[in-house]
Image (tube, rainbow, N blue to C red):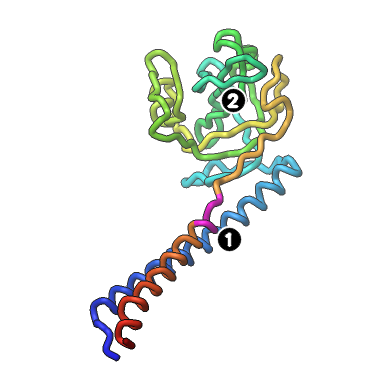
Amino acid sequence: MKLPFWATFFTVLSVCVLCALGTWQLQRLAWKEGLIAQLDAAYATKSSEPIALYQKVAPEYEYGTVNGRFLANKAFLLGPPQMHDEQAGYDLVVPLETEAGTLLVNMGWTPYSLKAQPIYHAQGQPVSFTGLLRLPRWNTFTPLNVPEKDVWFRLDMQEVAAAKDLKDIYPAYLLADSASYKFDAAFFGDGDVRRVYPPNNHLQYAMFWFAMAGALVVVYVLRFVKRSDA
């Protein structure tokens, strides 16, 4: 039985690549499951461990506490609008000036206009926030920001920094669950920890790549091995 060289070569190469992709997805699965376990532990204990904002590369997700000076005069509302109890509202985002730079803090949903927010009495005050540090994400369907009108849909850090004159802005933001300062309104999901997890579809991806490798082997066998036997 003589098998075609190039067909065999490219089949073996393709199977190796597909299996490598499947193996990589399994490695990503193990890493992601470990990260989710860490987040679960942090959520359960409401960890107050300080987040190291001096690191050059922002982690994908990290739960803990940050300290800084509250910049209420540079706050803004982040859309699109969301409905809660038949009320439309936005997320309130306030910059926090830390020793390592400026961090944006998402304080949660609010139905009030920016001017009506009960935060301005805290201008310049030292405040600690506890919550989840995460990288901003949006997709192609997310509307563009209109900085000149103070209309925001995307946490584009450089765009926000330029519009709000913020120095050394951190590439991630904090989804806050609590604060050391007593605000005259219910923020932070009414005291509930807002559990956010990274997407974890790596097992499905791994199964897809391994299935593709298996299908390629089956096609090769039916096309060349079975025909050669005949």
In the image, residue 1 sits, relative to residue 221, either above or below, namely below
Quadrant of the rendering where the N terminus is positioned: bottom left
Q: Residue furthest front?
A: 230
In-image side of 192 versus 123 (left or right):
right
Q: Position of residue 75 (x, y in %)?
A: 53, 19
Vertical placement of residue 9 versus 139, above or below: below
Residue 194 lies in what quarter of the image? top right
In this view, the residue in front, 183 or 210, is: 210
Mark 1 or 2: in front is 1
Residue 108 locus on image (x, y percent): 62, 25
Residue tagged by mark 1?
30
The residues colored magenta run 200-204
Q: Residue furthest right?
A: 45
Secondary-structure class at tag 1: helix
Residue type (three-letter) at the residue carrying disc 1: Ala
Which numbered disc, 1 or 2, marks the residue that appears first in the sequence? 1
Residue 83 screen position, x and y as percent: 60, 20
Residue shown at 53%/46% (left/top)? 59
- Whether the magenta-drawn stretch holds residue 202 is answered as yes
Q: Position of residue 98 (x, y in %)?
A: 56, 32
Q: Neighbour class for label 1 at 10 Å: few (<14), some, many (≥20)?
A: some
The residue identified by callout 2 is: 69
Distance in Å between CA atoms under marks 1 and 2: 38 Å
Q: Quadrant of the C terminus?
A: bottom left
**Three-letter amino acid code at disc 2?**
Arg
> What kind of secondary structure does the magenta stretch mostly adopt?
helix
Q: Is residue 213 left or right of residue 75?
A: left
